[in-house]
Image: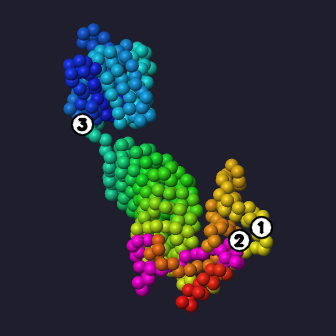
Amino acid sequence: MRLQCDVEVVNRMLPTYGMKSRGRGARAVLSIGRHLDKDTQRTNIYLLICTAKDKAGSKYKLKENIEKFFTWFVEEGKATVRLKEPAVDVCLSKADANGLKNFLSAARLAHRGSENDMLPLSTLTPVRARDVEKPKKKLTIVSKKDYPLTSNFPYSLEQLQVSYCKLSRVDMRMLSLKGLRRLDLSNNHIKKLPATIGDLGCLAELVLHNNHLEAFSEALCLSSLRCTLQLLDLSQNRLQGLPAQFCQLRELVNLKLDNNRLLRLPFHIGQLSKLCFLSAAHNKLPFLPGNFRKLSLENLDLFGNPFTQPNPLDHTIQLTFPLTLQEMASRAVIDLRIPYGPRVLPAHLCQELELAKTCDCGRACLSSYIQTTVNMNLHLVSHTVVLVDGMGGTEAPVQRHFCSLTCYSEFLDSCLQRSLR
């Protein structure tokens, strides 16, 4: 049984002499195994602690020699083993939680004097220098020949870049790196993202530039990424659209969608209240969603999209007279802010409510509305705007929806009055 972690051996007699411990641990390898006691010529179970400064290690007898285990923070990779003789506390930290639990179980068995065949014992030998190095936080692989095929990625990684390795899928070994904060898989051949990326509970930056992605799944939008993801780079892929649930990624600050095949942006993109940097240049966007007006950006790049020239008189009418019962009920749910969910309503109704449009009057409309597009100066939503076209323009067409003929006619009246000024 072996465990890699930070270890500090604290002598409990130090305060007696007016001394204090260092208060910090050193990287170490702990082993539990048999050792021949020279005094008694008997084989006993010992704990061996090896560090970079002491590769041969220090041995501590375990049988009937453990006074107490402190395991309040074992889920955080921390624990303390108090020995009777010598009077020391072995303080463990930065350990893998599951590995630490197994190690403590083995130590308990050794303390009780269980039969040796019940214990997962190791050979008590000096360690190699690389075994007691500090945990690796960052790893960059930019060549296929350097890609690890037989060994795992260091469990302690917080930043991992694997580029130019011709990966066609995400390696599942990466998804076991629970401390990962930045994952860069740019310049590969990845076609699909596994939903389990959403299990990386600390992931703040996900870079997927220049792959073969055709979709970004709803499952990822509803995963723990909602609470952690701040930067998402999906540029230079094959995306044609993003799911409505994409706007659940409320922590996004930087979103890159350049050089895809996007025909539309998420309908409720205005819900990304923390978004500061948005680039969606060189796509196939004919217009922007009405919710786009709610954004407050620092930098916006929409260059190279085939934006249509809007005309408020060109409209699509999908009004029904009278309104259906479902339309009236759905409008009431949204306008009155009545809570709903899959436990209350069928899933397809919940999805329709999530895609509700907002009229200029502030009321909701779902399947019964009038739609048109109008030009909007992009400086209204962003401090810095990259020119939309080669003519120096900073305007783009934005969808507008109206819940009734009355609201639409009032809008046309206001457009007419502006044109007469």
Q: Is 240 covered by the magenta stretch?
A: no
Tag 3 near tag 1, CB within 8 Å? no
Tag 2 near tag 1, CB within 8 Å? yes
Choose mark 3 or mark 1, whichever is in front: 1
Report which quarter residue 398 is drawn in.
bottom right
Residue 402 position, x and y percent, is 65, 74
Q: Is 403 covered by the magenta stretch?
A: yes
Q: Is residue 291 left or right of residue 236?
A: right
Q: Is tag 3's residue or tag 1's residue first in the polypeptide sequence? A: 3
The residue sitting at 53% across, 65% down in the picture is 270
Q: Is residue 259 visible?
A: no
Residue 380 position, x and y percent, is 47, 74
Amino acid type, callout 2: Ser
Screen quadrant of the C terminus: bottom right
Q: Is tag 2's residue or tag 1's residue first in the polypeptide sequence? A: 1
Q: Mark 3 sits on what residue?
A: 129
Q: Mark 1 sits on what residue?
A: 324
Using the image, tell me which numbered label, if any, was put on residue 368: 2
Choose mark 2 or mark 3, whichever is in front: 2
Q: Is residue 182 visible?
A: yes
* Residue placed most toward the observer, 382 or 43: 382
Residue 283 position, x and y percent, is 48, 74
Amino acid type, callout 1: Thr
